[in-house]
Amino acid sequence: MKLHNNSAHFLKCSILLLSIVLLYSCGIGKNFYADQELNNYPGTIYLSNGEVKKGQVGMPSSNSKTILLKTKGKADESIEAEKVDRIEFTANLTADKVHVVRYLPVKGMFNKRSNRWVVCFSEGPYTSAYVGAANYKINADGTMGFVGTRQVVNHGNGTMIVNPSYPVYMMKKGDDALTHVALTKGISFEDSAFRSGVSNFLHDDSQLTEYIQDEKWGFDNMNSIVQNYNPNRGNSALVIDGVTIAPRKRSLLTNDFNKEMIWYVESALPSDDKYSAQFGIGIRSTIHKFFTYGVDIGYASAKYIDQTKRLENHSINDIDKVPVEERDLSKQGLFRVNASLAGQLPFRFNNIYLIPGAHLGLGAMLGTEYSTFYYGPMATLDLGFKLKRGNIFLIGGGYRHNIPLKGDEAKTEASGPGFEAYEPYGNILIRAAYKF
């Protein structure tokens, strides 16, 4: 009986103790998560003078000039951003994740500097990488969240939402400011642009940048890039995460254009002199090294029979019997757009590329008085040169045969009164391109 009473007393004490612990924990948790809602987190502020301060730290936005520090038993403190070397935020109560945020100058146009808060993504012996955003927060799973502005673009009867992109910065040991190298999230072709930007910035380690291009590395590989970058590598063997990389045997059919972004400008010279030269700027990429697709927009102009001029130039009585002369024509400015899907054979001979391609094109030229739509085959030949920092410059030419999608009757219905435009049946192409 006595044992039973002792057991009951022990059980009561245990329940009471557990209740106190739970209530205390809930109080801490409540305060912690309430602070999270206010974007305050447990953190440590390291000042430039060597002083260290701990407490609940307000997460800065990109352009914050001060930092709020809450310390138990003390008044809230506002610390100037310029005095902070770095802030280490604890992601959760167990402190198993730490995020480093720093206030650093960023290089702008004309070498102009502007300070902003950035998140340190990785720090190596010779370089470091950061990501910037308008605002930051720590997610429930302990990861760092980036907050930007989603762009809502209204077009016609629809709406297009453009997700925010975040700048990626890098800084080499000894640099006094961050350099913008790429974007991450929210954009197409981001891996291609990332490889180009990082390769340009780290060009003094050519073996690493060549490997980045060959392996098609993207932002997810940033930590390995930072940790393995070595500007003093010279001709020493490339070692990635402790593994020595053997030199790769180059194939005649190169993979250098697979999943890469290429900007190009093009001039189309019509085979019929009734159309003037056309100009366009576009972008193309590859599904596989053998298949490419792209789109360009630009300007063209077409000659058309100007009925007012014909009346002025000829007798009204016999105008139908007089053939159309050059002086009877006027020009119409047209908006030009073309899209194409192509097969290609990208040959590489050391640092020279030869790329024949066969395309199927679809295009339009649109004006106030007349619009024409066409499709047809296109053949091109590009000659490329690999530049010092890994980018590729291409020049080329080709021929496009345009087949109208509209018949004569439909074209007449689509035209303005008295407007007769000539169709562009063929174009000789001259173009220049740049692989970033």
Image (cartoon, grey):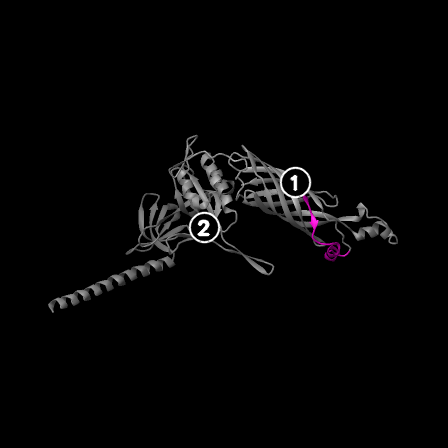
Residue identifier under label 2: 133
Find residue 205 and report its image quarter.
Answer: top left
Which residue is pictured at 39% across the width and 44% down the height? 122
At 35% from the left and 58% from the top, the residue drawn is: 35
Which residue ends up furthest to the bottom in the rendered image?
Answer: 1
Which residue was labeled with disc 1?
Answer: 398
Q: Amino acid at mark 2?
A: Ala
Q: First in sequence: mark 2 or mark 1?
A: 2
In this view, 338 is above or below 20:
above
Q: Position of residue 307 (x, y in %)?
A: 80, 53
Mark 1 belongs to which amino acid?
Gly
Residue 406 or residue 154, whichever sits in front: 406
- Judge whether 352 appears above or below 417 on screen: above
Between 119 and 430, the one nearer to me in the picture:
430
The numbered disc on residue 222 is none
For mark 1, give the secondary structure: strand
Q: Nearer the viewer, mark 2 or mark 1?
A: 1
Residue range corresponding to the magenta coloring? 399-417
Q: CA distance from mark 2 to mark 1?
A: 44 Å
Q: Quadrant of the N terminus?
A: bottom left
Few, some or many C-alpha atoms within 10 Å of disc 2 (few <14, some 14-19, many ≥20)?
Answer: many
Residue 204 visible in the picture:
no
Q: Position of residue 418 (x, y in %)?
A: 78, 55
